[in-house]
Image: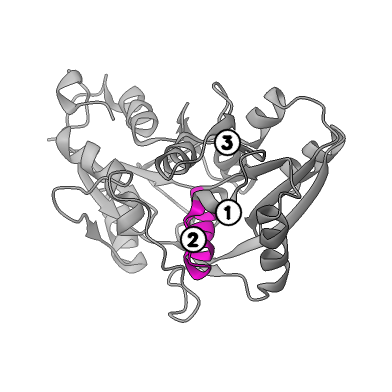
Amino acid sequence: MRRPETHELNGLTGRRVLITRTADRARPLASLLTGLGAEPLVLPLIDFEKAGNQVPLDAALDRLVAGDFDWMVISSITTVRVLLEKASQRGIALADLVPADTKVATIGPSSRQVLESVGLTVALAPAEVQSAEGLLAVWEASNGRVFLPQADIASPGLRDGLAATGADVTSVVAYHTVDYPASAELRLTAELPSGVVLSAPDVPATLSPEEARTALDAGTLDAIVAASPSAARRIAQLFPALGTCRLVAIGRPTAAEASRIGLAVAVTAKEPTPDGIVAALESIFANEGNPQ
């Protein structure tokens, strides 16, 4: 992660930035913002639950372990958490779920970092556009067998795009995306490896929707980070008017969804990482000076 001291005249000092993630998932970005003089705040909007029907996922994992897939494609860090939990239930490490001959592809640097930290080699990931679209752009035509675990609300674009290249795609629901908070009995409990998720010096303050609305109405929030298309939809439901608050989209899919539902996107991060989001925020505020 980029060191705070490399930033000069970043325009973030005193800026209040609302991150629409749970505190644990917001910490890497919050840590970086704090080091740059901003005040990160957290508004959990989206949470994740285990799939109600585990049979398709378990069956696909049995096939994975048996070497029945040529590729495993990971499209989110939440999918990695599901696989970590499934591996733990089987009494093995995540790396042991994936045979040596099965290649791994992913679409984002966070997922790649976690996968590699547990001993898996990522054979393919887009360098430029870090999204499903980016992965499809570098995917070669194949008639191989692909395991694609995803969220229940995942766009069919990745699945259909892979199939269009000739791949035999087994797509299964790995988890459900729900409004925060997830039910206690279905919440994902697997922790990401230590060292991958960086702890902030302090846990960022968590706001309720009512407190966030009050701050928006008072004009005391400078930016809100939409961390996913589903988060953008929740933002539109809760806050029809953002006032002077700037909306930052974590990536192109989130920006497209925000625009589709009528939210004005001030900037889209070029990379869906804490550094990428900070760079996007800097592009807004660097020439405006710090707030009084």
- Percent across and percent down for residue 136 are 71, 30
Q: Residue at 19% x, 24% y: name it.
A: 289
- Residue 189 vertical placement versus 246 (above, below): below
* Cα separation between marks 3 and 2: 25 Å
Q: Magenta segment range? A: 77-94
212 displayed left or right of 161: left
Label 3 secondary element? loop
Q: Residue at 17% x, 32% y: name it.
A: 36
Point out the frontmost of discs 3 and 2.
2
* Cα separation between marks 2 and 1: 8 Å
Q: Amino acid at mark 1?
A: Leu
- Percent across and percent down for residue 271 are 46, 29
> Mark 3 highlights which residue?
107
Q: Amino acid at mark 3?
A: Ile
Q: Residue at 42% x, 63% y: name it.
A: 190
What quarter of the picture does the N terminus occupy? top left
- Considering only order in the chain, which callout, 3 or 1, is on the residue closer to the N terminus? 1
5 displayed left or right of 194: left
Characterize the magenta stretch by its predominant secondary structure: helix
In this rendering, does residue 291 appear at all? no
- Residue 173 vertical placement versus 199 (above, below): below
